[in-house]
Amino acid sequence: MPSPIIFLDFDDVLAETRAPRLAAHRDAMAVEGIVFSDELFDEMCGGLSFAAAARATIRVATVTRDAPDETTIELAALRAERAFGDSVARGLPLMRGASELVRGAAGIARLGIVTRAPRRDVDLVLSLAGIADSFECVVTAEDYSGPEPASDPFDIAIARMARGRAVTIGDGVALVASLNAVAAARAARLHPIVVGAVSPSLAFAGDGYVTSLEGASVRDLLRLAAGAGAR
């Protein structure tokens, strides 16, 4: 029987990124005179690249229906990305239970990361945590530049995994922490399991929900994805 596949998002599944990412995005938007709520950030920007998050925020904040200026978006995204990178360089903690789950998956499941975070930030966190070798593939912001959310990043990861061993589409699990990531995982025919202290609407958006990865096992997550019930 093929080993099950589990994809983890970097943001707020593997690493605690919400606070530094929110701060970086808020400061970048403030330069453009744009103010937004925490709730808007969580609802619209989670699971997106810095550029897509800037585009979404500007569209909501502006009165006109015209598309935001691409130069403005690119500059705002660059500011946010640099500020977030500075936070990563100072050190980001892993989410509770993430390291234990990853290490416990050895020999049971094939792991991958699918995220819209920059590769250098992901690589640094994985390296410092000593778990880089646990992942069969890592798909980051640099691997896909199309519309968001979309199945493409997951499709890229699945294709890379399939080069080594066969992959059974439809049985894979994606651990996510945003509505955009849920939508992308579903489009790729994966089972999204929402992780973390999230809103009720997000908690019920996936095929399952866990408040934390602490104490969770690969088998727990697979049973949850198969409809065995919530922990």
Image (tube, grey):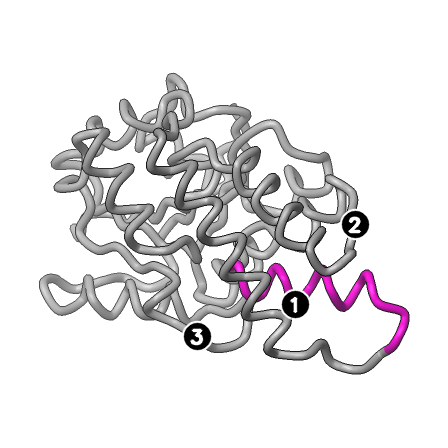
Q: Which residues are magenta?
A: 50-64
Q: Which mark is residue 55?
A: 1
Residue at the image position 39 percent from the left and 62 percent from the top? 141
Residue at far bottom of view: 66
In the rendered structure, which disc, 2 or 3, sits on the residue that comes first in sequence?
2
Q: Which residue is mark 2?
A: 35
Query: Mark 3 belongs to which amino acid?
Result: Ser
Residue at far right of view: 63
Check whether the beta carbons of the residues at disc 2 and disc 3 lie within 8 A of each other.
Answer: no
Q: CA distance from mark 2 to mark 3?
A: 26 Å
Query: Which is in the foreground here, disc 2 or disc 3?
Result: 2
Q: Which residue is mark 3?
A: 145
The answer to which of 157 and 44 lies nearer the viewer is: 44
Percent position (x, y) of residue 4? 26, 47
Query: Mark 1 belongs to which amino acid?
Result: Arg
User: In the shown orientation, is residue 164 left or right of residue 126?
Assistant: left
Query: Which is in the foreground here, disc 1 or disc 3?
Result: 1
